[in-house]
Amino acid sequence: MPPQRANGNSRIMLAGLGLLVAAIAVYAAFQLFSPPPSEVDVAYNTVSGEGFYQVMFETEAQPVPVNETHEWVLTVTTPDGAPVTDAEISIDGGMPDHGHGLPTEPRTTENLGEGRYRVEGMRFNMGGHWEIRIGIDAEPGLDEAVFNLDL
């Protein structure tokens, strides 16, 4: 009789292990096909890393296109809403999951006044998660804002 009891315990352990494997598979599938986690902000409006600036971008190309060069207008203000004029703006970015940068070299081409800056040369060569880093050098200091785009 004792051998049968051990055999019954083995079946219970195998069934439990099977349920555990199935639960892990369901969880992995959910993670693979779920939208980006809530801590990844995909808004067109963000606060810079040190909190010096509020940065927003606008584009007439809606939704943000893939394989089409377009322009953005950045609006840079202080946290209390005052326009940041005469800032030096740099643009960089890429696909963190793929390990490559932007296919173009976007740059600020015009200071439109009132904290607004025209950026030309924005282009995304494939769909997926993109991270765009906006460097801002003005008073009160050097800071960086990051936009996450899921195209």
Image (cartoon, rainbow, N blue to C red):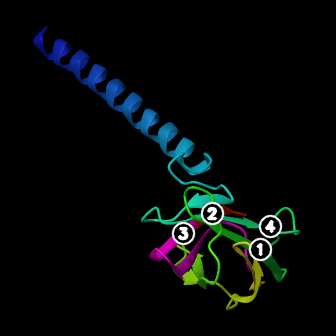
Q: Is residue 41 above or below residue 147?
A: above
Residue on which the image places disc 1: 73
Cβ–Cβ below 8 Å for labels 3 and 1? no
Q: What residue type is labelled 1?
A: Val
Q: Counting residues from the N terminus, which is met first, the one under dot 3 or under dot 2?
A: 2
Tell me how far mark 3 sits from mark 1, CA to CA: 14 Å
Magenta-span inclusion, residue 58: no
Earlier-in-chain disc, 4 versus 1 = 4
Residue 26 place in picture, x, y as percent: 51, 37
Circle nearer the N terminus (4, 2): 4
**Secondary structure mainly formed by the magenta segment:** strand
Residue type, mark 2 in image: Ala
Residue 48 on image: x %, y %:
51, 65
Q: Which circle marks residue 82 in the picture?
A: 2
Is residue 126 part of the magenta span, yes or no?
yes
Q: Distance between the residues labelled 4 and 3?
A: 18 Å
